[in-house]
Image (cartoon, helix red, strand yellow):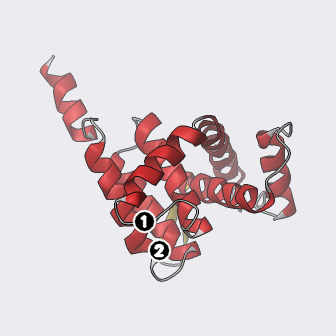
Amino acid sequence: MNKECKKDSCIHYRRYAREWVMQFLFQNDLTEPEKDNDPAKLFSFQLRETELFELPDKKMFKRSYKDALKLLTGVMDKHNEIDELLSNFASKSKWTIDRMDTVDRNIMRVSIYEMLYCPNVPLIVSIDEAVEIGKKYGTSHSPAFINGILNSIKNSINRPSKEQSISDENSD
């Protein structure tokens, strides 16, 4: 497994991708870029400007960047569908998507995209990653809020767990 270890924690290349995409989406929410701008070009520009291109391991950066572009493209393509689902589940807790913290909203957008469209990422891993990113970038309330909304969404998704998929394949 390709990980970069810092102090007590190891960061997987996908964590960087998730964080970068969340940061890009956050910036988009605040600036509302022109519709004709290419998100991939804007994303690359943002990485260069914030010096995120400088991961110690170039191989780690390439894998993170490649994964981030897939996530970004997917989240942007499915933005309306993701926001509708997020709104529906947030409204059960009397929240609106506009009332949510911008960081929390964008962390959940990335996670919801993974939960719906990335079958190679177990649902619980996507939620755990979102909670960890919420701890790093959000408020003290972010982890519990993110976990609650995403777990509700997870429970509505009809997708077998990774373990179930493996056992189904082995029984064939």
Query: Along the horizontal axis of the image, is 4 left or right of 121?
Result: right
Q: Position of residue 131 (x, y in %)?
A: 43, 66
| Depth check, front residue: 54 or 47 | 47
Query: Residue beneath label 2, please?
Result: 142
Q: Position of residue 161 (x, y in %)?
A: 25, 40
Q: What is the quadrant of residue 19 in the picture?
A: bottom right
| Residue appearing at x 50%, y 70% in the figure | 134
Q: Position of residue 70 (x, y in %)?
A: 62, 37
Q: Position of residue 49 (x, y in %)?
A: 87, 61
* Amino acid of disc 1: Ile
Q: Is residue 59 above or below residue 56?
A: above
Residue furthest to the left in view is: 171
Q: What is the quadrant of residue 129 in the picture?
A: bottom left
Q: Is residue 30 above or below residue 88?
A: below
Query: Along the horizontal axis of the image, is 51 left or right of 86?
Result: right
| Depth check, front residue: 97 or 41 | 97
* Amino acid of disc 2: Ser
Give the number of marks.
Answer: 2
Give the SS element for disc 1: helix
User: Visible in this render: residue 27?
Assistant: yes
Residue furthest to the bottom in view is: 140
Q: Are marks 1 and 2 in contact (CB under 8 Å)?
A: yes
Give the SS element for disc 2: helix
| Residue appearing at x 30%, y 40% in the figure | 157
| Residue appearing at x 57%, y 54% in the figure | 18
User: Visible in this render: residue 2?
Assistant: no
Query: Residue beneath label 1, please?
Result: 146
Pointer 2: residues within 10 angstroms few (<14), some, or many (20+)? many
